[in-house]
Image: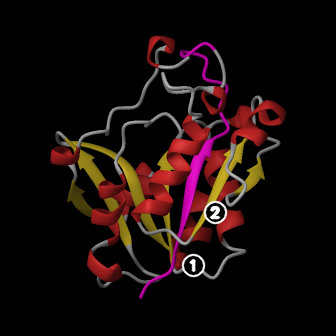
Amino acid sequence: MVRAVGIVLAAGAGSRFGGPKALARAEDGTPWVEIACRTLLDGGCQDVVVTLGAGADEAGPLVPGWAGTAVVPDWVDGASASLRAGLAAAAGTSADVAVITLVDLPDLPSAAVRRMLGPDGGVLGAGTLRRAVHDGRPGHPVVVGRRHWEAIAAAVTGDKGAADYLRAHAATVVDCTDLGGGQDVDRRDRGR
């Protein structure tokens, strides 16, 4: 069975949100970082890493004790810095694939992660590239095999993730529309 590490990208300042989304909480008080970590774990990831940048000192205690953290000193450079830090942390695990998601997807179900990993890990391996699509729009989770980690880290810049790399390398598209939860939250009225 394939071994998966989950990566929660949570290092940004959340300028449209009004503050770091790593500090956001659901209406019941549960931190979004905890929700994202649990989604990855329940979806089939054996390890989980959260990238932290803006508000890292306050966000660190919100990360479940069983998950790791990767502090992103250059978080102001955008999503690429968070992704690079997450992939570098993943390299320290024995995972074959990384399942990447965003902290601002509190409604993403673990079923989406399971679908992305396939039954019993499916045919996933070090060369895997899979991207979730919601209502025809590319989104998360994204599954990236270990063989691509260095290349993606070298290719991403600024506030862009791996979309160009995934497109250029013909990532397999997995429709997760029926599962819901693919819309990121950019307004504070969804958090506390």
Q: Identify the mark at residue 95; answer none if there is no mark.
A: 1
For the stretch drawn in magenta, the main secondary structure is loop
Q: Give the range drawn in magenta.
A: 1-18
Q: Identify the mark at residue 87; answer none if there is no mark.
A: 2
Which of pointers 1 and 2 indicates the residue nearer the eye? 1
Tell whether position 148 is magenta: no
Name the residue: 38% across, 48% down.
140
Residue type, numbered disc 1: Ala
Neighbour tally class for label 2: few under 14, some 14-19, many 20 plus, Cα within 10 Å? many
Query: Residues under labels 1 and 2: Cα distance?
Result: 11 Å
Name the residue: 46% across, 11% down.
189
The C terminus, quarter of image? top right
Counting from the top left corner in percent of width and height, residue 90 is at: 65, 68
Counting from the top left corner in percent of width and height, residue 168 is at: 36, 61
Q: Identify the mark at residue 26; answer none if there is no mark.
A: none
The answer, for residue 16, to whether it is visible in the render is: yes
Tell whether position 4 is magenta: yes
Front residue (pair 99, 88)? 99
Q: Mark 1 or mark 2: which comes first in sequence? A: 2
The total of numbered circles placed on residues is: 2
Residue type, numbered disc 2: Leu
